[in-house]
């Protein structure tokens, strides 16, 4: 979409700016977001990169004809959730002399964080092109002497877990079915990684996993528990000693970190869910310690699917 050309005489006279923000999840429009304040900023280097900050009233509407609603992100499909939602920002310049209006696109921004503070919600986002540019997923490399196809593939993928996570988040932003797809993919991958972890663990890896399980048993705060939960699953992936599968598993888990957190905030009894997750984590750890790969895989799938049913993710 090309920005319209605004006549010079309009800019010389009195005019106003208005901003419209619409939330989309893939092809699905989630609503027009009321805006209390914010900014869009762009920097020009080799690529044009943009970022967005918004302040949204927790209770409100973007149109006087619409009923007020609560904009708190309580579900994966909420307009302001970090679940691949993309904010389409349009700036309209209106002449106060003639009344003519010129709408123009200000960018599309993938939501990267949402923070609820009293009656306000703070939202940040990155332009989709910004996310692709900063990932630097492709970089020039020279094959090493004596390297095989498998060893070079592992070397190329090594160190790109964060970029993979961003790539999956971008996929979520552009696909309406990615929640279920990522869930099923995560189940398949984590069955493999936990089976391999049960086969390959050493004392150091087992101690790290055990420490994380112990810390989750003691931690009742949602954010810190969610961080430990992610770390536990990533540690299992690392212990699997298969860099490609491990990186894919870690990337998917990182891509789902924010959606899991937002969904956890919305459930009625978080502590009951936390207690159940702790029991499941302990069971998975015990199976790994016994080198029971099949048992660990069964427990891992049950763990992921029961948690996601409770959180209403991927269903």
Image (spheres, rainbow, N blue to C red):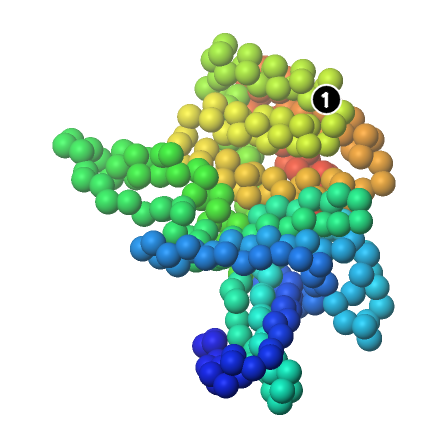
The quarter of the picture where residue 59 lies is bottom right
Q: Nearer the viewer, residue 175 or 58?
A: 58
| Location of residue 182 in the rendering, given as x and y in whole percent from the top left corner | 57, 48
Q: Is residue 15 above or below residue 22?
A: below
Could you tell me how many numbered marks the image carries? 1
Element carrying mark 1: loop
Q: Residues within 10 Å of mark 1 (few under 14, many from 20)?
A: some
Residue 180 visible to the viewer:
no
Q: Residue at x 49, y 12 (%)?
A: 204
| Location of residue 187 in the rendering, given as x and y in whole percent from the top left corner | 59, 40
Q: Residue at x 53, y 75 (%)?
A: 104
The quarter of the picture where residue 49 lies is bottom left
Q: Nearer the viewer, residue 34 or 293?
A: 34
Asked whether, in this view, residue 171 is left or right of residue 302, the answer is left
Q: Residue furthest top?
A: 203
Residue 191 visible to the viewer:
yes
Q: Nearer the viewer, residue 311 or 180?
A: 311
Q: Is residue 226 above or below residue 76?
A: above
Q: Residue at x 59, y 75 (%)?
A: 92
Asked whether, in this view, residue 11 is left or right of residue 274, the answer is left
Q: Is residue 33 above or below residue 261?
A: below
Asked whether, in this view, residue 131 is left or right of residue 284, the answer is left
Residue that badge 1 annotates: 219
Q: Is residue 243 above or below residue 114?
A: above
| Location of residue 131 in the rendering, given as x and y in whole percent from the top left corner | 45, 51
| Location of residue 157 in the rendering, given as x and y in whole percent from the top left corner | 35, 39
Q: Residue at x 19, y 38 (%)?
A: 143
């Amino acid at each position: 979409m090309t920005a319209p050309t605004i006549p010079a005489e309009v800019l010389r006279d009195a005019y106003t700016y208005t901003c419209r923000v619409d939330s989309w999840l893939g092809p699905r429009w989630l609503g027009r977001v009321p805006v209390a304040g914010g900014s869009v900023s762009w920097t020009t280097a080799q690529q044009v990169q943009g970022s967005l900050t918004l302040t949204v009233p927790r209770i409100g509407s973007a149109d006087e004809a619409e009923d007020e609603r609560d904009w708190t992100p309580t579900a994966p499909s909420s307009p302001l959730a970090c679940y691949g939602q993309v904010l389409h920002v349009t700036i309209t310049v209106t002449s106060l002399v003639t009344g003519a209006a010129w709408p123009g696109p200000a960018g599309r921004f993938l939501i990267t964080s949402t923070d609820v503070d009293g009656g306000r919600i703070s939202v940040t986002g990155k332009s989709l092109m910004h996310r692709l540019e900063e990932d630097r997923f492709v970089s020039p490399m020279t094959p090493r002497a004596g390297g095989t196809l498998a060893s070079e593939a592992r070397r190329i993928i090594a160190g790109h877990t964060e970029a993979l996570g961003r790539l999956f988040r971008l996929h979520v932003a552009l696909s309406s079915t990615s929640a279920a797809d990522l869930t099923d993919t995560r189940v398949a991958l984590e069955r493999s990684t936990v089976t391999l972890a049960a086969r390959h663990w050493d004392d150091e890896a087992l101690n790290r996993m055990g420490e994380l399980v112990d810390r989750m048993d003691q931690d009742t705060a949602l954010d810190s528990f969610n961080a430990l939960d992610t770390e536990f699953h990533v540690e299992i992936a690392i212990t699997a000693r298969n860099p490609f599968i491990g990186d894919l598993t870690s990337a998917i888990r990182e891509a789902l970190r924010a959606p899991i957190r937002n969904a956890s905030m919305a459930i009625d009894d978080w502590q009951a869910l936390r207690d159940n997750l702790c029991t499941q984590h302990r069971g998975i750890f015990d199976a790994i310690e016994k080198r029971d790969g099949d048992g660990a895989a069964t427990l891992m799938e049950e763990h992921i699917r029961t948690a996601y049913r409770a959180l209403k993710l991927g269903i």
